[in-house]
Each structure stands twice: as structure tokens, then as C-alpha cells.
Image: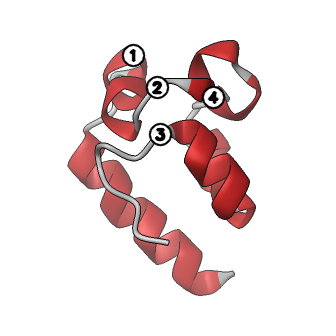
Amino acid sequence: MEITRDTLIADVVENCPEAMPAFMDIGMHCVGCAMASGETIEQACAAHGVDPDEFLVYLEKFLQTV
């Protein structure tokens, strides 16, 4: 699955559940949040004060290890 700034958190949860620890590692507990169903990676990053580009790099590296 390609994950971009515009990918919905809900889509990641559904299609790539192994990514969830990466979200939690940086304090994004979006996986259980009601907002996640319609929130993009970029919106979640903004809400949590995280640079979306840096997070996507981190997420990609994380997924290579699982």
C-alpha cells in the first residue's frame, strides 16, 4: 500500500495494520480515535505537531523492518 499525506488513517488501519506501532511511537493514537475515519496523515500530523514528510520517511523505514 502506498501511504501519502492524503491517505486516510482509517485506510492505513484497514490495509496496513502493521503500521500502527509507528503511529503510536510518536504519540499518534489515532488508530482508536473516531476522527481517524476521515482524517488524513497530513491532518493527523498537523493535530499532533509532527512534520508529515518526516513522519512518512519514518513510517516507510518502520515498515521495512516488519
Name the residue beneath numbered marker 2: 39
Dots 3 and 2: beta carbons under 8 Å? yes
Coloration mode: secondary structure
Using residue 64 as the reference point, say whether residue 13 is left or right of it.
Answer: right
Of the numbered discs 1 and 4, the one sitting upstream in the chain is 4
Residue in the picture at 45% in, 75% down: 61
Q: Position of residue 5 (x, y in %)?
A: 29, 46
Q: Which mark is residue 47?
A: 1
Amino acid type at circle 3 is Leu
Q: Label 3: which residue?
A: 8
Give the number of the mark in front: 2 or 1.
2
CA separation in Å, label 3 and label 2: 5 Å
Question: From mark 2 to mark 1, how far is it between C-alphas?
Answer: 10 Å
Q: Nearer the viewer, mark 2 or mark 4?
A: 2
Residue indicated by mark 4:
30
- On screen, residue 64 versus residue 25, left or right, reads left
Up the image or down, 4 lies above or below 26; here it is below
- Within 10 Å of disc 1 (Cα), the crowding (few <14, some 14-19, many 20+) is few
Q: Tell me the CA gap for discs 3 and 4.
A: 11 Å
Q: Nearer the viewer, mark 3 or mark 4?
A: 3
Tag on residue 10?
none
The earlier-in-sequence mark between 2 and 4 is: 4
Sequence-first disc among 3 and 4: 3
Which amino acid does the dot numbered 4 rest on? Cys
- Name the secondary structure under disc 2: loop
> Does residue 21 appear in the picture of this structure?
no
Dot 2 and dot 1 residues touching (CB under 8 Å): yes
Task: Give the total of numbered labels.
Answer: 4
Q: Residue 58: x, y in percent?
A: 41, 62
Query: Rounded to the nearest whole Å, what is the CA distance between mark 3 and mark 1?
Result: 14 Å
Q: Are marks 2 and 4 in contact (CB under 8 Å)?
A: yes
